Image (spheres, rainbow, N blue to C red):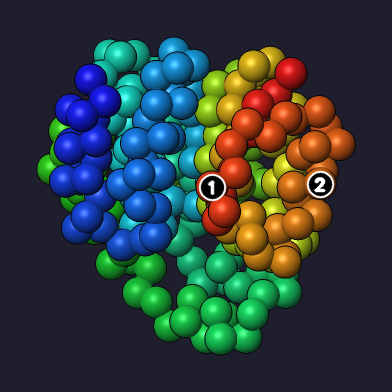
Amino acid sequence: MTEELRGRIAAALTPLHGWTTPEKGVRLAELVLDAQADVSVEIGVFGGRGTIAMAIAHQMMRKGAVSGIDPWTAQASLDGVNDTANDEWWRNLDYDAIYEHFVTALLHNGVARYCRIMRERSDTAIRLFDDESIAVLHQDGNHSEAISSAEVALWSPKIKPGGYWVSDDTDWATTQRSLRMLETNGFALLEDHGGWRVYRKP
């Protein structure tokens, strides 16, 4: 199963925009499978690498779906205090083209029915999720200290006991407060991959 999953995810992710590696995509899918998730979430879809990997896992189980949350706007990318060079890069993207490429990829990979696209900010999308309803959450949106920390405060109650929280770019200075908040909230560090970590809610 793992080799089948690895091959499929590598083929699906390689043509897409973004930085989630096939190895990380496989791990995200494994967490969805391990949790037998009915509900999983990715905050910060961008080109869809993480979202599609998680959707593949839902398809393999033939149940549930991943909610891919991203407004695909420059304003959302630039919120908070970020690196100036990064801001310039995000300011000049064609967000609509990236979004359309992601939607096409969902259809091409046959997983559209296992993904709920939510083109909005995470702090508004949260209204549609009950407390302790999410089995796996991948936080990969705006990495400013203000936004990443606010997401931990808002979304950590939505994770099921025993559920997984995956944090991206955990080696950035701006994400350190959000990581400390997770640990203060009782999330246990399970895996540290250098640039991303897996936590589990007690």
Q: Nearer the viewer, residue 187 or 107?
A: 187
Residue 30 lies in what quarter of the image? top left
- The answer to whether one can see residue 149 in this image is no
Q: Nearer the viewer, residue 59 or 164?
A: 164
Q: Amino acid at mark 2?
A: Arg
Q: Are marks 2 and 1 in contact (CB under 8 Å)?
A: no
Residue 90, above or below 141: below
Quadrant including the C terminus: top right
> Mark 2 = which residue?
180
Indicate left or right for 138 with 177 as reference.
Answer: left
Residue 184, above or below 119: above
Residue 38: image location, x then y, percent: 45, 16
How packed is label 2: few (under 14 Cα within 10 Å), some, or many (20 or more)?
some
State how far apart marks 2 and 1 are (Cα): 17 Å
Residue ranking furthest to the left: 108
Residue 57 lies in what quarter of the image? top left
Q: Nearer the viewer, residue 107 or 168?
A: 168
Indicate left or right for 22 with 140 as reference.
Answer: left
Q: Amino acid at mark 1?
A: His
Residue 185: image location, x then y, percent: 83, 32
Quadrant including the N terminus: top left
> Mark 1 = which residue?
193
How packed is label 1: few (under 14 Cα within 10 Å), some, or many (20 or more)?
few
- The answer to whether one can see residue 46 in this image is yes
Residue 93 lies in what quarter of the image? bottom left
Residue ranking furthest to the right: 184
Residue 15: image location, x then y, percent: 19, 58
Name the secondary structure under disc 1: loop
Q: Nearer the viewer, residue 193 or 155?
A: 193
